[in-house]
Image: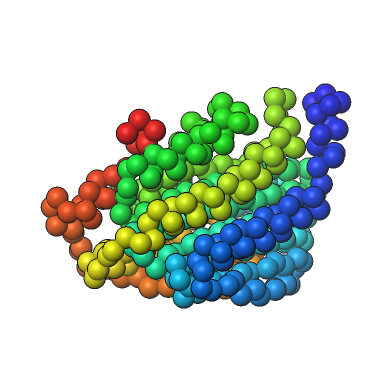
Amino acid sequence: MDLVERTKVVNLDKEEISQSFKSLQNDICEALEACDGKEAFKEELWKREGGGGGRTRIMQNGGIIEKGGVNFSEVYGLLSNQMADVLQVSRGGSFYATGVSVIMHPISPLIPIIHMNVRYFETSSGERWFGGGIDLTPIYIDVLQAKRFHQKLKSLCDHHHPSYYPAFKKWADEYFYIKHRNEARGVGGIFFDRLGATHEISLKDRFCFVKEVGEAFSGIYTNLINENRNLLYGDLELTWQRIRRGRYVEFNLVYDRGTKFGLNSGGRIESIFMSLPPAVDWAYNYHPLPDSKEAETLSLLETKIDWLSL
């Protein structure tokens, strides 16, 4: 690492990152409240016994959002052996982690579920990295909307590095996969983790990329809401929505790394589980009718679809 690279790393401190994430939480909440038009986020401040805390903001029973959360956390303390092993970092010392996590469950089954997360982690031994991503889980897949979603993410990634989109899209395909169902959670997006400094890319550059991912969220989702908010639906669509939400719950409880980190770090349970939808259904051995909209969506829940070429 040369002198310029070391200077860039030194100039990036956790207070700057934390303040940026707090501002991001504020901006996202303001944008979603304006789009929903009925409800505001309710805030709970919480403290972690081992160090740190956060701001949980929840919206329920809005005009558009049935249940949604925009969480900020900043936690630190002694690094337990269990946490070190889960994160695959050196044992001993202390850790610091901060981030924003967003999950939106709309009322309408024709508006997609969306998830976004940006985070930073460091240890006293010098390990430092960013992680995060954004992915879309439509109840009914609209191919054109999925394509535009990926085009936006590709443009964002290409602005920072040409390798980002293909690598992070593949990572999302592999990560947001429900193995026991043999199906993707949705249409994917981008997912990345352990983005530290390299000879080519500084930690400051990683931070700029992560900030842009977070800042892109509001525009992406409010556009999707406005495209779909007036579409009509009935009982069949609501039944399918509850079944698909059940798949979302399965992924979060079985595979999601953020859920596991929150539980292993002694995080606040209500904040960790705010990602779960308000109403779900597990119909036994459910199969949609052939050639139905539901069957079409199932056929598109694959992991290697090139959405940009459709």
Residue 65 image point, x, y percent: 46, 67
Q: In this view, does 167 lie to the left or right of 140?
A: right
Q: Is residue 37 visible?
A: yes
Q: Which residue is drawn at 65% across and 73% down?
A: 43
Residue 291 in the image: state x and y as whole percent: 14, 50
In percent of width and height, residue 49 lies at: 73, 72
Question: Residue 98 appears at what percent x and percent y?
Answer: 70, 56
Could you tell me which quadrant the C terminus lies in? Answer: top left
Occupied quadrant, residue 248:
bottom left
User: How many numbered discs sit on the rendered protein?
Assistant: 0
Q: Which residue reaches farthest left?
A: 290
Q: Is residue 139 above or below residue 144?
A: below
Viewer-closest of 35 and 61: 35
Q: Residue at x 82, y 46 (%)?
A: 13
Q: In the image, what residue occupies the spot 25% across and 68% down? A: 234
Q: Can residue 243 be seen in this view?
A: no
Q: How is the image coloured?
A: rainbow
Compared to residue 154, the image places residue 122 above or below, namely below
Left or right side of 106 for 264: right
Asked whether, in this view, residue 25 is left or right of residue 185, the answer is right
- Between 144 and 206, the one lying in front of the other is 144
Left or right of 241: which side holds 40?
right
Residue lying at 51% horizontally and 69% vertically, measured from the top left: 37
- Please name whichever residue, 283 or 32, is drawn nearer the observer in this view of the structure: 32
Find residue 143 and report its image quarter.
top left
Q: The N terminus lies in which quarter of the figure?
A: top right
